[in-house]
Amino acid sequence: MEKRAFIAIGLSVVIFYISSMMFAPEKKPVETSVPQKSASVVAVPAENPVQPTVLQSPPVVANQSLPTSVPPKDVRIETDLYTALFSSRGGSLKSLTLKNYREANTPSARQVTLGTDSDPNLLSFATRATGIAFQDGTVFMSNVDSLKLNNGESNQLIFNYISGQGFTIRKIYTFTAGSYGIKLETVLFNNSASPLSGSIQHVMTYPAEPKVKDNRFDTAGAYLFSDNSLQSEKIKDVASATKRYDKAIQWAGFADKYFLSSIIADNGSIASVELKKNGAGYFESVISSPQFTVNPGQSTTVTNHLFVGPKDIDILKAQGNSLVQSLDLGWFTVIAKPLLYSLKFFYSYVGNYGIAIIIITIILKILFFPLTHKSYKSMKGMQKIQPEMTKLREKYKDDRDAMNKAVMELYREHKVNPMGGCLPMVVQIPVFFALYKSLMFSIELRHAPFFFWITDLADKDPYYVTPVIMGVTMFIQQKMTPSQMEPLQQKMMLALPVVFTFMFLSFPSGLVLYWLVNNVLTIGQQMYINKLVKD
């Protein structure tokens, strides 16, 4: 859908305004990857490794260690925003259900669940360790069976694993009502007689192919912010080789079009991230801490922050660490994000995102009026001198240099610029693309109603009314646009509104609304210019 949208917008802007001049006489983010490595993940030493600290540790009791046969149990955490289900296996998150978002645009639809509690292979933030005898899937003991938080309350879920080899691993999750952010502290206590060296790893898994077929999974994959740039990977790109990142990692996780599960660094607590396809066929992200050495009687703590929730630009920005970059708005992000903030600003006053889109469209039209006015006047002027251009072509058909000189003199005489019709429109193309991305990937439009039959601005018009009207306005706009094309070429161009109408049938109605309103305003503008520039 996104590729067709770029084709449609590009053709509409370029063909209608630039191609008329042509018939006159005269950044995927850079991938950071390394060659294939073995399945064993080794953390890279960081410039500022985790420093051991002296903390009170649990007593070492040999018979208190947990046998691997102990069945895992679930712990339920409920806040005003979500219900999370944690597992004592790996001290991990099994699923998190968002209370304010539903899978379908009906009151009875099930709430959006990130992760799943039905597949034991899909666990987030499960803990491993390198350098010590701590196996994947180790069962922890929890301090509570459930928690419920309200009115800004905070509370902790603590998982403990006491080994029989002189070390203890403790995972402390801190939840706060009213926030999607979760603090995670992983503490290693060394009660043995020898130093322990290694790193803490948190593992996230994601299905290679989401079971639910929904367009929100069109962009699903692994995302991380490393070396001051957003990196994204699809399962096909890491199916045969591990990809590794180890430069200034601020966060890593999995995301689709609207939702994100991520682990965020705290003071350099993420040294590397490795992406691979694991033995079960799932997408796996292994997030490693810096290397550490813990002397006997001491402990070390690796602190991270987790975010599992919607890709709302304000919510993401509040998390810090450039998590807002997970909202990938393309090449023209620097323009798209202000447009998205503007969309939310107007919504706060009018209470309808459809009306907010109309307001933004009108404002953009006003801002670009001087440029488009100049463009249309230039095309109109070129159209007026077309008969004289034809005479010059005939007169100097055997002398190209003389014809070019005569044409330039004609331009100067009538004060027209052959590029004046296209350059002002080229300036607007980045804004058009930026607004397209803002509307296409904004979770705010998801299930947001407009009026009458349009109940979801992120979904297509169920009766195709707005795409058809949009096609009609494109036809009228094209008929009114001055052109120097040959009659046959003009007839071919008239078929474009039909093609565009079919392309827009499946586009989100919010995008169609913007394009429709823009066409209507352009028609009014052209009528005004036609009155000013008399034939």
Image (cartoon, rainbow, N blue to C red):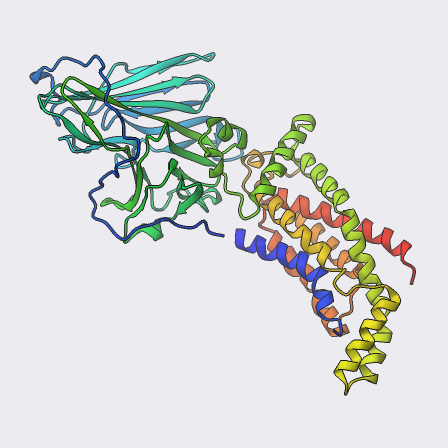
Return the x and y of residue 70 as percentages of the image width and height: 15, 24
Q: Is residue 310 toward the left or the right of residue 245 in the image? A: right
Q: Is residue 140 visible?
A: yes
Q: Is residue 104 toward the left or the right of residue 204 in the image? A: right
Return the x and y of residue 511 as percentages of the image width and height: 63, 45
Q: Is residue 84 above or below residue 418?
A: above
Residue at the right extreme, as displayed = 534
Q: Quadrant of residue 290?
A: top left
Q: Is residue 261 above or below residue 375?
A: above
Return the x and y of residue 347 as percentages of the image width and height: 65, 30
Nearest the viewer among 412 and 521 is 412
Nearest the viewer among 303 and 183 is 303
Nearest the viewer among 535 and 33 is 33
Q: Is residue 526 toward the left or the right of residue 32 in the image? A: right
Q: Is residue 374 above or below residue 263?
A: below
Residue at the bottom extreme, as displayed = 398
Q: Is residue 436 toward the left or the right of residue 257 in the image? A: right
Nearest the viewer among 204 and 491 is 204
Return the x and y of residue 223 as percentages of the image width and height: 40, 41
Q: Where is the C terminus found, in terms of image quarters?
A: bottom right
Q: Quadrant of residue 173?
A: top left
Residue at (81, 50) in percent of width and height: 525
Residue at (24, 19) in percent of width and height: 53
